[in-house]
Amino acid sequence: MTRNAPHPAVTDRPVPAGLDLEPYDPRTAPDSLIEALTVFENIQLHERQPDNPPLAPSQVAASLRHLPAFVEVPAWVVRDGERVIADATVALVRLDQNRHMAQVKLGVLATYRRQGIGRALLEKVVDAAHADGRTMLMVSSNSRVPAGETALRQTGAKPGLAAQVNQLDVHELDPSLLQRWITQGQERAAGYNIEVWEGAVPEEDVTAFLELTQVMNDQPLGELEVEDTRLTVEQFLAAEAHFHASGRQRVLGVARRTSDAGLVGFTELSWHPGRPSILAQGATGVVHQARGLGLGRWLKAVALQRALALNGDARFVRTENADANAAMRLINEELGFRPYSATTLWQLEVSQAQAYLQGMVNITV
């Protein structure tokens, strides 16, 4: 990757008097900063998902300090005294694909917005992305925080993928529906079995499971300018190590063809024992040759049964579905998922962000 010099026309933009903007390394952040970041993250989390249990400093520390080696994350905070009131990170993922893209997370507490703090942090993000040869920033907004969308439109960012965070209230789940899906799957997909893996992927199945996950490249991506992602075995194991270091627990439902033991489908549910009330429904995918047999519903039913048996404190299951992913939205609606909030992935060209920061463009909201 060719690294560029920081764009010469963009100068450091000061934050308001009394505030301090400083960089930090997520992997080596001291405990005092982790604690301040946790308070900040919980305020942000409450704004987006007001009924969520709070994060603990140990969870934040585990997630930051065990990042995979192929991910570099320049980061900055803005402090008011010892209090973190704004934060920005730019993930520079070093895979063979999507080397044009940088994933950005930037937030400012509500009472400190519209003071130029977000703009100052964006300048740091843009310089880091540009220096690494990235040409596109990808940023997410949440419908519960309209200030995020307003700010992104001002920069000239373009919406790339609209999605819905959907939620299932476990107390309203019909257990008989899960059993029907299991029975129907067994009847319609007689040449397949469903396995449940708890925790790590079995060593003997790592390569086959990694290949199976490529099915997720089929999911609708709207207007996002991204390439199919493919991890090496080493990178996959590094990502797995980060997941397990975070303390999260997981159930994987996996569909296997009986004729040759090939893997053809999977679904993932995870949770943190420190916040057990929220189950996260992750990716679900079935290879083309095995679709139309009810394997998706069978997988989700078996995995959800096992997750609820292991985590009796679960109250909600949350998942995010692209608006364009009609097939998965239908399955989740049948299961009882209902809209919780909306998200949008935005794309902002680095050159456009530089022009915005230099005041060369006038974007109307």
Image (tube, rainbow, N blue to C red):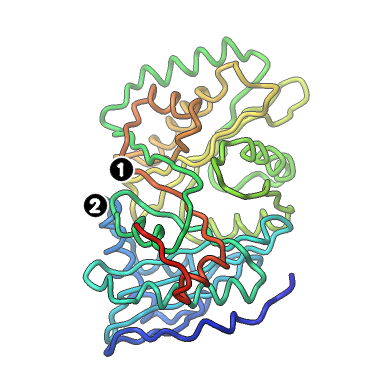
Look at label 2 and name its amino acid: Pro
Identify the residue under disc 2.
50
Is label 2 in contact with label 1 (beta carbons under 8 Å)? no
Tag 2 secondary structure: loop
* Count of labels in the image: 2
Tag 1 secondary structure: loop
- The quadrant the C terminus occupies is bottom left
Query: In the drawing, does residue 103 fall left or right of residue 176?
Result: right
Look at label 1 and name its amino acid: Asp
The residue furthest left is 111
- The quadrant the N terminus occupies is bottom right
The residue furthest right is 260
Identify the residue under disc 1.
313
Examine the rendered structure and indicate whether residue 225 appears above or below residue 155.
Answer: above
Examine the rendered structure and indicate whether residue 242 appears above or below residue 262.
Answer: below
Residue 313's x, y, as percent?
30, 43
